[in-house]
Image (cartoon, coloured by chain):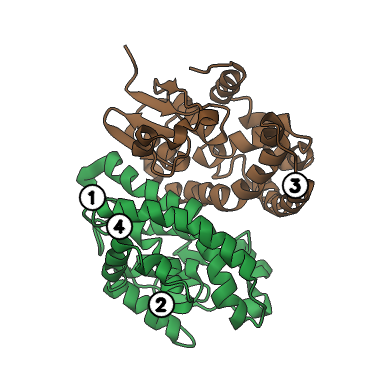
Chain colours: A brown, B green
Amino acid sequence: MAAPVTVYGPVISPAVARVAACLLEKDVPFQIEPVDMSKGEHKSPSFLKLQPFGQVPAFKDHLTTVFESRAICRYICDQYADRGNQALFGKKEDGAVGRAAIEQWIESEGQSFNPPSLAIIFQLAFAPMMGRATDLAVVEQNEAKLAKVLDVYDQRLGESQYFAGDDFSLADLVHLPNADFLVNRTNKAGLITERKNLARWWDDVSARPAWKKVTEMQSTPRSS
Amino acid sequence: MAAPVTVYGPVISPAVARVAACLLEKDVPFQIEPVDMSKGEHKSPSFLKLQPFGQVPAFKDHLTTVFESRAICRYICDQYADRGNQALFGKKEDGAVGRAAIEQWIESEGQSFNPPSLAIIFQLAFAPMMGRATDLAVVEQNEAKLAKVLDVYDQRLGESQYFAGDDFSLADLVHLPNADFLVNRTNKAGLITERKNLARWWDDVSARPAWKKVTEMQSTPRSS
């Protein structure tokens, strides 16, 4: 029988991969429904009912639809609080303060890390896949922005094992897709691997079974 | 006696105004601690201990510090669940699904609405205040991006009174600072007022006592 949870979109997309990683950490069964973006399926009327901006992923759990990858991750953790990784969105006993320690780094990822890292990934990994030219000026400009963010991250990860403290959490998870692209699919791995604490963190978080499963799915032509 | 909650930064900053609006909706007493950004106080070692990226606002509640305005808003709602507006971050009985309905639009604001609207506001409102030239090409480029987002918003607000349904929530609140700047401090008000459902929504949400109080604070030379 099909699982009630469906993720719509190609798992090579960082935002789709983010949601898949969260579902795997929470041990929530799901299926991937392919969306052929080269054919514009993400702009079709049926897709726009799931995701009004025409972006991947879309997400459905029974009759509930949610969009925006970080909102979907929060929903999965709240809805499936008792499954899988119990510390992912803060332990119950840590309350609002524990949740806030995670939220501030999820927001840093969305506001400060994602824009420059995604721009670099687009130019150095996606543009070649799509047969487009790489704009090296865009890469250089965003590398300078990203370096400043990563300096703050490296300092933070010198103070605690993970972004929000002693436990791996959504604060770490949301960074995985773009970080993996930078390290494994561009020539900019050094941004992460040449910063001591970030490198130690990356070796740890990228070896988690849930993330390794996502990268296997990304290497399979039709992920499901 | 001083309130335990302190917001650090000038309330004219959209991100500081976002947090102030949330505190006022939740009826949580607070004080504003000025940060003179023209003197670089947001890059001082003591400020960086509160906010490692050197951005406003920083936030403190007793001994807890939180950064990133949207993370701070979530914390305020979780920590002061029983105060003020009880629907702001979802009613308890609506559970994870109700929370997700709000979260997806908070994320849309952070990912899709904020970047182009902030770029326009910077060029048309802040640059003149700072004696800098306005780059009209940047305005035009971001106006095109923002228009696409606002088309989706206008459609959404034709289906429900507020972004997440029947109740004003954080999904609406996070949009207020940039929307107010666009309408009242640039010549781009039409982006909002010429879209029927968005205009109806703006008339409603901008008249809320909490937001009116924030705009009064913004008009006072030293807000506190």
- Give the label, 4 or 1, closer to the camera: 4
Separation (CA) of disc 3 from disc 4: 38 Å
Question: Is residue A79 placed above or below A116 in the rendered structure?
Answer: above
Residue A40 sits above or below residue B63 on the image: above
In this view, the mark in front (3 or 2): 3
Task: State how far apart marks 1 and 3 are (Cα).
Answer: 44 Å
Give the residue at mark 3.
A139
Local SS, label 3: helix
Contact, mark 3 vs mark 4 (Cβ under 8 Å): no
- Please determine if labels 3 and 4 lie on a single subunit: no
Q: Nearer the viewer, residue B140 or A77?
A: B140
Instruction: Please report whichever mark, 2 or 4, sits nearer to the chain's N-terminal start.
Output: 2
The residue that label 4 is drawn on is: B169
Q: Which residue is mark 1?
A: B91
Residues beneath discs 2 and 4 located on the same chain: yes
The label nearer to you, 2 versus 4, is 4
Q: Residues within 10 Å of mark 2 (few under 14, many from 20)?
A: few
Whether residue B15 is visible, yes or no, is yes
Q: Quadrant of residue A126?
A: top right
